[in-house]
Structures are given as C-alpha cells and as structure tokens.
Amino acid sequence: MLDQSHKNILEKTKEAKLSETPVSVFMNSHAISLRENYSVKTTIDTFNTHHISGAPVVNFENKIVGVISEYDLLIEAASKPLSSHIDFKTTITSVFPDTTLKELLIIFYKQKLKWVPVVNKENYVQGVVSRMDLLEFIASHSKI
C-alpha cells in the first residue's frame, strides 16, 4: 500500500498525463556499465570519474549479469585488496524501455531503489533511470 505522499505523486503524474510515459523517454541512455572482471580499484575510479553511485555489470557479450552500488563497493574496499575482482549482486531489478512512469514509481517505492538498469528483451543494457531522472521529467512536464 502506498502512503499519501506517493499517492500524491501518482495523482500528479496522472493529471499531467505522464503516468503512461515510457521509461525510454527520460532514461539516461549513456549509462556507464562495468565489466564483471573489473577490480575494486577500477570500479572506484569509474564511480568517481563519472559521479555515479551504482552501475550495471555486464559480461563479455555486454549482457547484464549484475549490479553494484556505492555501498557494496565501500564494503568491498574496506574488506579486501583493491586489486580483487568486484563482487556484485546477481539478483537484478531492471525495467524495459516500455515500462511506464507509473510502473517505475511503484518499483522505486516498493523496493526503495535509487536507480534501475533499463534492458531490452535480450538483456542488453539500454540505459539506466534514476529517481532524479524521474523527478526532473515530472518537474519539467508538470504545471507549477
């Protein structure tokens, strides 16, 4: 069950006729992906250079195999050599480009996520969408 503030956001997107907008309209299609064989140090450098707090992890075919967050990376950096390969979560919440704004809001709310990868049917990363991407889209298309 959604609390009142989340119901208000859903209502606002409905009023602005945004709730059925597909993720492909506001996702970041220039997402940074990491290779599954990256070291902890390389991953730290990538996060720092691109000012990101998480990223999809892809295999040699460029298909998504996991995700890693800044928090996960912090634990790894503190507990093992920086030259070690990254450990990443293989349980992935992702969305398709045609996922609607309303569906994405519910996923963010229920799973308390900050971002999700956007993948196609073959599991190739198409981009990522963050809470800020969503907020910027709503703000730019809503009446003040």
Image (cartoon, helix red, strand yellow):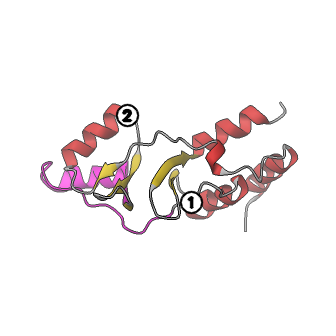
Q: Position of residue 112 (x, y in %)?
A: 55, 58
- Bounds of the magenta segment: 66-93
Which element carries disc 1, helix, strand or loop? loop
Residue projecting furthest to the right: 15
Please state, as top left, top right, bottom left or bottom right, where the C terminus lies in the image: top right
Viewer-side residue, 25 vs 3: 25
Residue 134 at x, y percent in the picture: 64, 44
Which quarter of the rendered picture does the N terminus lie within? bottom right
Q: What element carries label 2?
A: helix
- Mark sitting earlier along the chain (2/1): 2
Residue 124 disc label: none
Q: How far apart are marks 2 and 1 (CA)?
A: 22 Å
- 78 lies left or right of 81: right
User: Which percent across, then down, holds residue 67?
Assistant: 38, 58
Report the number of discs: 2
Q: Which amino acid does label 2 sit on?
A: His
> Height in image: 2 above or below 39?
below
The amino acid beneath tag 1 is Val
Magenta run includes residue 68: yes
- Residue 97: image quadrant is bottom right
State left or right for residue 64 relative to residue 18: left
CB-based contact (under 8 Å), mark 2 and mark 1: no
> Which mark is drawn over residue 50?
2
Q: Where is residue 4 in the image (x, y as percent from the top left)?
A: 78, 56
67 in magenta: yes
Disc 2: CA contacts within 10 A as few (<14), some (14-19) or many (>=20): few
**Residue appearing at x 53%, y 41% in the figure:** 28
Q: Which residue is drawn at 12% across and 49% down?
A: 83
Nearer to us in this view, 120 or 83? 120
Bin the neighbour count of mark 1 within 10 Å (Cα to Cα): few under 14, some 14-19, many 20 and up. many
Residue holding disc 1: 95
